[in-house]
Image (cartoon, grey):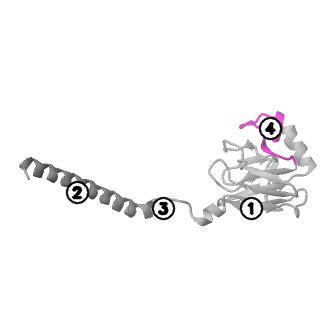
Amino acid sequence: MTTAAVDEADLNRRDFLYIATGSMAAVGLAAAAWPFIDAMNPSAEVRGQAAVNVDLTSMEAGQRVTVKWRGKPVFIDRRTSGQIESAVADDAAELRDPQSDADRVEDAEWLIVVGICTHLGCVPLGQKVGEPVGDWGGWFCPCHGSHYDTSGRIRKGPAPKNLVVPPYVLVPGEKVTIG
C-alpha cells in the first residue's frame, strides 16, 4: 500500500469515527433531555378537565350553580324571564365593555360565565341564595366593589372587562359541554 492510500484510509476511518461519535452524543443528549421535555406536557388530570359535561335538567328558573372547569369556577345561571328582559334592556346602557346580551349567550335562558372577577381574579358573590348580587342583580365582587349585571357585564367598580364567556355548547336534552 502506498502512503497516499494509507492516508486516504485513515481519513475515511477518522470521518466515520467523528460521525459515529457525534451521532451517539446526539442520541444520548436526546435520551437525557426527553424526561424533562415530557414533564412539560399537561398532566392527565388537566387533560381530563379540558371539557366538562353538566346535566341541566334539575335546574329551575332563577337557580345558579357553580362547576369547576380547568381549575376555575364557572357560573351557570338559568335566568328568569325578568332577568332576560333586564339584560336585553341594558344593551342600550352605557357599558364599560360594550357587548349585547345576545352576543354573550347561546340560548337566552342560560348564561354561562367564568366566575373570576376581571379586576384582580377574585370570585364574585351572587351564586348562593342570600349573597349580595350587586346593584344590577348579577354578581358582586366585595374585594374592590365591582358590580356585574344579569348578563355578566361590568357595570360599576374597577373591573375593566365583562365576566368571560367560556367556549360551550348546549346539547339537546338540557346538557351543556364546557370547553
Q: Check disc 3 and report its element: helix, strand or loop.
A: helix
Q: Are marks 2 and 1 in contact (CB under 8 Å)?
A: no
Q: Which residue is mark 3?
A: 38
User: What residue does disc 4 label?
Assistant: 100
List the residue tagged with mark 1.
67
Q: Is residue 174 found left or right of 13 in the rendered image?
A: right
Q: Is residue 125 visible?
A: no
First reached walking from the N terminus: tag 3 or tag 4:
3
Is residue 150 shown above or below 34?
above
Amino acid beneath label 1: Val
Q: Assess disc 1: are there few (<14), some (14-19) or many (≥20) residues with their C-alpha within 10 Å of its C-alpha.
A: some
Of 66 and 178, which appears nearest the observer? Answer: 178
Residue 29 location (% of width, % of height): 35, 60
Q: Earlier in the sequence, mark 4 or mark 2?
A: 2
Q: Is residue 94 left or right of residue 108?
A: left
Q: Is residue 29 positioned above or below 156 on the image? A: below
Q: Amino acid at mark 4?
A: Ser
Q: Which residue is at 88% across, 50% downward?
A: 109
Mark 2, residue position? 17
Asked if disc 3 and disc 4 are in contact, CB closer than 8 Å, the reply is: no
Mark 2 or mark 1: which comes first in sequence?
2
Disc 2 marks a residue whose amino acid type is: Leu
> Which numbered disc, 1 or 4, marks the residue that appears first in the sequence?
1
- Which dot, 2 or 3, sits closer to the camera? 2
Q: Position of residue 64 (x, y in %)?
A: 82, 58
Asked if the residue at tag 2 contacts the one at tag 4, i.e. Cβ–Cβ closer than 8 Å, the answer is no
Q: CA distance from mark 3 to mark 4?
A: 43 Å
Which residues fall within the magenta stretch? 91-108
Q: CA distance from mark 2 to mark 3?
A: 31 Å
